[in-house]
Amino acid sequence: MISVLILTKNEEQDLPACLESVSWCDDVHVFDSYSSDNTVAIATNASAKVTQRQFDNWAAHQNWGVAHIPFKYDWVFYLDADERVSPGLKEALLRFDTNSREAVAYEIQRRDFAWNGTWLKNSQISPFYLRLFLPGKMRYERLVNPISIPDGAVKRLPGYLDHYPFSKGFRAWWSRHLSYADMEASMRLNDRDSNRSFSLKKALWSKDFTERRYHQKGLFYKMPGRPFIKWLYMIVGRRAFMDGMTGITYATLQAIYEYFIVLKTRELITKNGYGTTGNKKATAWK
């Protein structure tokens, strides 16, 4: 068997179905950020073990959970409350050889569903995520949309992890992404402050999906006109138009989100005393 880890913060709407999809597991842990609704009660009633910690940022929070939660089994499967284990993935997890050490983490394909139930098959930017892993071999980086950094080989597990990002409606989606934009902008300035470098070679040809995505994000944030580039990439590069108007609408939402990050970055530059060229007033940008 494997252990299950679910991150929550006021998830009374989505948590029941999430817990139902992992009801086959006898070691379910709900890692809660002090919810003010019925999340904890729902988890407790479903016989899940609850651990609470004040949320600071995604990487720190997930790293703490992986390191401190007392999992019963060696392998941990992680999911969010708005995600569901599909029947095919359930079978793959139940068949998984927990004694195997051919890899320290397994990629799982996620299916993102739109507000109308359409699978965003082409519009989805990142379809594979490291969700099954040995806790001692996994760490996370980035304040938001964290990057999974495994210490060892990675393989792929069959089956789909179903994701419903619009389950709480458009208002909740926008609110969540506005907070994401705040953290993305902070990371952008931190990267500039620290002169962090990103590799085009790794962004294009790294065999490690996680490493490739990390360098792609770093290089992308240095490009002008990012909102339009992102929209064009999703529409043409990923063929979001093949998902119909739903795909085109989703690509537009993602482009607007990218513009939020641009605006928030400019706001932080002004607030922190940096000129429009990225140089701090009276101090050269290092």
Image (cartoon, rainbow, N blue to C red):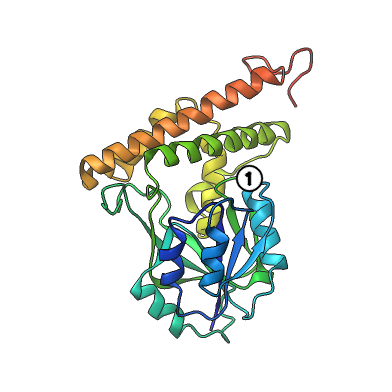
**Residue drawn at (68%, 39%) of the image:** 196
Q: Looking at the figure, which quarter contains the C terminus? A: top right
Nearer to the camera, 132 or 34: 34
- Relative to 106, say whether 92 is above or below: below
Nearer to the camera, 118 or 7: 7
Query: Can the viewer see residue 78 in this picture?
Result: no
Going by the numbered disc 1, the residue's amino acid type is Leu
- Relative to 30, say whether 8 is above or below: above
- Relative to 212, say whether 172 is above or below: above
Crowdedness of circle 1 by 10 Å Cα count: few (<14), some, many (20+)? some
Q: Residue 212: give x, y in percent of width and height.
A: 52, 52
Direction from residue 58 to residue 228 in the image, left or right: left
**Residue drawn at (46%, 28%) of the image:** 259
Give the residue number, with chain letter if any, for mark 1.
143
Direction from residue 58 to residue 243 in the image, left or right: left
Q: Residue 32: give x, y in percent of width and height.
A: 61, 58
**Based on the displayed image, in which of its 4 quarters is residue 44 positioned?**
bottom right
Query: Can the viewer see residue 89 in this picture?
Result: yes
Q: Residue 61: give x, y in percent of width and height.
A: 66, 54
Nearer to the camera, 73 or 35: 35
Mark 1: secondary structure = loop
